[in-house]
Amino acid sequence: METVTISQLKSQPSKIIGSALDYPVAVAKRTQIKAYLIGKELYEKIVSLLEDYIDKTIVKKTDFRKGRDFEKVAKQLGI
């Protein structure tokens, strides 16, 4: 993973943002990682995967034998 300093990010933002489109870039201050810069597509994919995981977890925890209708639960979850 590429690591850049905050000073480098300030002086070359377009170049570093371009690098982050394909793979995350770590942003460091005094040798400590303070943030990660990721591209839009990767961010959206991560959010989508997290939402799917949360939805699946809720569905797995739901006991449909107690009379809860799957369609109602799915509608509440927006799936």
Image: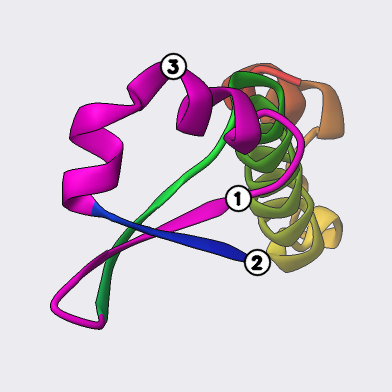
**Please, which residue is most extreme toward the bottom here?**
31
Quadrant (top left, top right, bottom left, bottom right) of the N terminus: bottom right
Task: State the mark number for residue 14.
Answer: 3
Which residue in the structure is indicated by mark 1? 24
Q: Using the rendered image of the protein, determine whether residue 33 is visible from the camera's viewpoint.
A: yes
Residue at figure coordinates x 67%, y 28% from the top left:
21
Q: Quadrant of residue 68?
A: top right
Check disc 1: other Cα within 10 Å, few if <14, some if 14-19, many if 20+.
some
User: Is residue 18 toward the left or the right of residue 29 in the image?
Assistant: right
Give x and y (percent) for residue 38: 54, 39
Task: State the mark number for residue 1.
Answer: 2
Q: Which residues lie in the magenta part? A: 6-31
Give x and y (percent) for residue 4: 39, 57
Check disc 2: other Cα within 10 Å, few if <14, some if 14-19, many if 20+.
few
| Viewer-proximal residue among 65 and 38 | 38
Q: Secondary structure at mark 1?
A: loop
Give x and y (percent) for residue 56: 79, 52
Quadrant (top left, top right, bottom left, bottom right) of the C terminus: top right
Looking at the image, tell me whether mark 3 or mark 2 is earlier in sequence order: 2
Looking at the image, tell me whether mark 3 or mark 1 is earlier in sequence order: 3
Residue 13 shown in magenta: yes
The type of residue carrying mark 2 is: Met
